[in-house]
Image: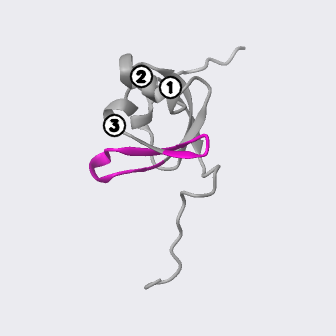
């Protein structure tokens, strides 16, 4: 019996802080699409969502050891595959130890 694989189309704006992803395709044409490609948003590149600003715009991601902030409207145009949670790069999880520190 063959397992059926369910594929859900997601984009970066669907992801939460700490969620890792692999770029599948950039659906934005023109100058903005070219700029995203120049920044590393190309098929197969992996990244992680670092954080979203208040009200979710912009979104900061770590891609190829660079922190990049993109508008939510741009993030909606980058189709990704979710790779789950985990910091993979060791920088975006902060733990508070004790009050007042």
In terms of sequence position, does the residue under pointer 3 or pointer 1 come before the other?
Answer: 1
Q: Quadrant of the N terminus?
A: top right
Residue 16 percent location from the top left of the image: 44, 45
Q: Give the CA separation, mark 2 to mark 3.
A: 14 Å
Residue 5 percent location from the top left of the image: 60, 20
> Looking at the image, which residue sits at the far left?
55
Residue drawn at 44 percent across, 27 percent down:
35
In terms of sequence position, does the residue under pointer 2 or pointer 3 come before the other?
Answer: 2
> Which residue is under mark 2?
33
Front residue of this view, candidates 35 and 50? 35
Quick check: marks 2 and 3 in contact, CB under 8 Å? no
Residue 37 numbered tag: 1
Residue drawn at 44 percent across, 34 percent down:
12
> Looking at the image, which residue sits at the far bottom?
100
Q: Is residue 63 magenta?
A: yes
Q: Give the CA separation, mark 2 to mark 1.
A: 6 Å
Front residue of this view, candidates 58 and 49? 58
Residue drawn at 39 percent across, 44 percent down:
59
Q: Quadrant of residue 23?
A: top right
Q: Nearer the viewer, mark 3 or mark 1?
A: 1
Span shown in magenta: 50-67
Q: Give the CA separation, mark 3 to mark 1.
A: 16 Å
Residue 89 percent location from the top left of the image: 63, 51
- Secondary structure under tag 3 reads helix
The local crowd at label 1, few if under 14, some if 14 to 19, many if 20 or more residues have their Cα within 10 Å, is some
Residue 17 percent location from the top left of the image: 46, 49
Q: Is residue 60 magenta?
A: yes
Quick check: marks 2 and 1 in contact, CB under 8 Å? yes
Residue 72 numbered tag: 3
């Amino acid at each position: 019996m063959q397992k059926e694989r369910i594929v859900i189309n997601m984009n970066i704006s669907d992801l939460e802080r700490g969620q890792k992803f692999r770029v599948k395709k950039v659906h934005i044409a023109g100058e903005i699409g070219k700029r995203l490609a120049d920044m590393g948003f190309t098929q197969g590149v992996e990244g992680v969502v670092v954080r979203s600003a208040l009200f979710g715009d912009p979104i900061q991601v770590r891609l190829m050891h660079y922190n990049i902030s993109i508008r939510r409207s741009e993030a909606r145009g980058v189709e990704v595959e979710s790779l789950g949670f985990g910091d993979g790069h060791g920088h975006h999880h902060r733990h508070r130890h004790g009050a007042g520190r």
